[in-house]
Image (spheres, helix red, strand yellow):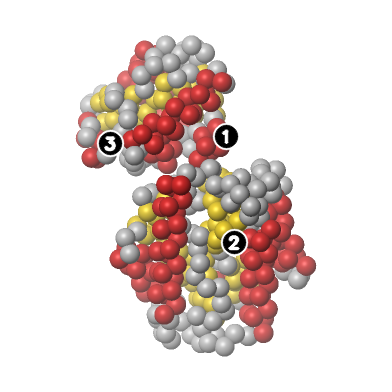
């Protein structure tokens, strides 16, 4: 595994050299893990890694993280700061010791502004540049090992959703089903990340919260669930009706289902993210529900549940083999109900394959 992270760094070093950038500064989060293999959460204590194009790279960690939480990394130089020291001052001196040739250091857009601002004030003649496009350009194309983890996470989320639908009964609450879903994902060896269950009118809230609402006959039930395996996510949404669906519920569900299936059938390498969004949106608009599809078609999935690429109107980014993303058309009738059918999919050499396979049906 260490070789995998080192190979990623070797690749990005080549890309940074070509842009006259001296190095890449990483803070806790997905990008730090992607390039170093170290997963340390963001806190008030500074942790950073500097990928040096021209020499030894290093990590700076607080004393209590000196053992990297038992994790291993290819970076041999681990610098430690004590609680009574100024970590930013130490980091600035370490970077200056690397003698940046071009005076340019790459950052990603999620870098903590406060730390970066203080660091900039101490680095005379050095400025930061956003290299998110380079970093995410690499992260968007998943290796086979990454795909294996995402596939496993999708398989587990499929089974967890199935367990939830098997547990539907009149009077059960959203929170009870949410807990059942999370427990099932944990039992199957994954880390639960989210398991939102919404009934009735709350299903029209794309980012609603599970509560104590009790299930009644005729309610729409929407579940949005995801877990992670070795840090890699899944994301699935299924919508059903508990009992006999009304004519309107059936019509809306069929439109969303058609949009999901059509988009997946049309997505292939070379299709742009904007075109992918259009494939699904045109189906919904033609049926007169366009204004009720209030979000983009999808987002990338990997070390984060939302990451590039984003399947959104106007995007000219072309989809490529190895990209993993969601296809999740939805119709949300505020005050009544909502329907979303979401799959995590991978772009292949000749099309698009769904990694989430749980049945798509209006009945549980």
Q: Are marks 2 and 1 in contact (CB under 8 Å)?
A: no
Which of marks 3 and 2 precedes in the sequence? Answer: 3
* Figure check: 248 above or below 55: below
What residue sits 38% from the left and 31% below the top?
Answer: 6
* Figure check: 104 above or below 228: above
Q: Is residue 89 visible?
A: no
Quarter assignment of residue 71: top left
Q: Pointer 2: what residue?
A: 328
Q: Is residue 62 visible?
A: yes
Q: Pointer 3: what residue?
A: 72
Kindly identify which numbered label has been placed on residue 40. Answer: none
Task: Tell which tag, 2 or 3, sits nearer the viewer.
Answer: 3
Q: Is residue 66 left or right of residue 227?
A: left
Structural distance between the alpha carbons of marks 2 and 3 = 37 Å
Secondary structure found at label 3? loop
* Figure check: 328 above or below 72: below
Tell me residue 149's x, y (percent). 41, 52
Tell me residue 286's x, y (percent). 78, 67
Q: Is residue 323 left or right of residue 56?
A: right
Q: Are marks 2 and 3 in contact (CB under 8 Å)?
A: no
Please tell me how crowded label 1 is: few (under 14), some (14-19), or many (20+) other residues with Cα within 10 Å.
few
Label count reads: 3
Which of marks 3 and 1 precedes in the sequence? Answer: 3
What residue sits 33% from the left and 35% below the top?
Answer: 2
Q: Pointer 1: what residue?
A: 133
Which of these two is toward me, 140 or 87? 140
Secondary structure found at label 2? loop
Which of marks 1 and 2 precedes in the sequence? Answer: 1
Structural distance between the alpha carbons of marks 1 and 3 = 27 Å
Please tell me how crowded label 3 is: few (under 14), some (14-19), or many (20+) other residues with Cα within 10 Å.
some
């Amino acid at each position: 595994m260490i070789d995998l992270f080192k190979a990623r760094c070797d690749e990005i070093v080549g890309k940074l050299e070509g842009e006259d950038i001296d190095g890449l500064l990483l803070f806790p989060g997905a990008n730090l893990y992607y390039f170093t293999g170290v997963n340390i959460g963001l806190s008030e204590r500074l942790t950073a890694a500097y990928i040096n194009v021209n020499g030894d790279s290093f990590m700076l960690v607080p004393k209590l993280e000196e053992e990297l939480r038992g994790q291993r990394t290819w970076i041999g130089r681990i610098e430690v700061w004590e609680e009574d020291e100024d970590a930013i001052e130490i980091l600035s001196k370490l970077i200056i010791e690397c003698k940046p040739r071009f005076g340019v250091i790459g950052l990603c857009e999620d870098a903590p502004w406060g730390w970066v601002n203080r660091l900039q004030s101490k680095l005379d003649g050095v400025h930061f540049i956003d290299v998110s496009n380079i970093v995410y350009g690499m992260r968007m194309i998943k290796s086979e090992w990454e795909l294996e983890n995402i596939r496993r996470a999708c398989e587990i989320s499929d089974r967890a959703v199935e367990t939830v639908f098997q547990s539907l009964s009149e009077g059960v609450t959203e929170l009870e089903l949410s807990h059942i879903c999370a427990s099932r994902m944990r039992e199957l060896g994954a880390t639960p990340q989210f398991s939102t269950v919404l009934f009735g009118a709350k299903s029209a809230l794309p980012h609603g919260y599970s509560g104590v609402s009790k299930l009644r006959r005729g309610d729409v039930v929407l579940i949005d669930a995801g877990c992670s395996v070795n840090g890699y996510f899944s994301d699935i949404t299924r919508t059903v009706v508990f009992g006999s669906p009304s004519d309107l519920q059936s019509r809306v569900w069929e439109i969303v289902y058609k949009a999901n299936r059509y988009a997946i059938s049309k997505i292939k390498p070379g299709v742009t993210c904007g075109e992918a969004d259009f494939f699904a949106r045109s189906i919904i608009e033609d049926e007169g529900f366009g204004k009720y599809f209030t979000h983009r078609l999808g987002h990338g999935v990997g070390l984060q549940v939302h990451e590039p690429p984003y399947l959104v109107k106007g995007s000219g980014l072309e989809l490529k083999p190895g990209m993993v993303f969601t296809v999740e058309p939805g119709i949300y009738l505020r005050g009544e109900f909502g329907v979303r059918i979401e799959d995590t999919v991978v772009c292949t050499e000749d099309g698009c394959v769904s990694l989430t396979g749980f049945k798509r049906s209006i009945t549980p």
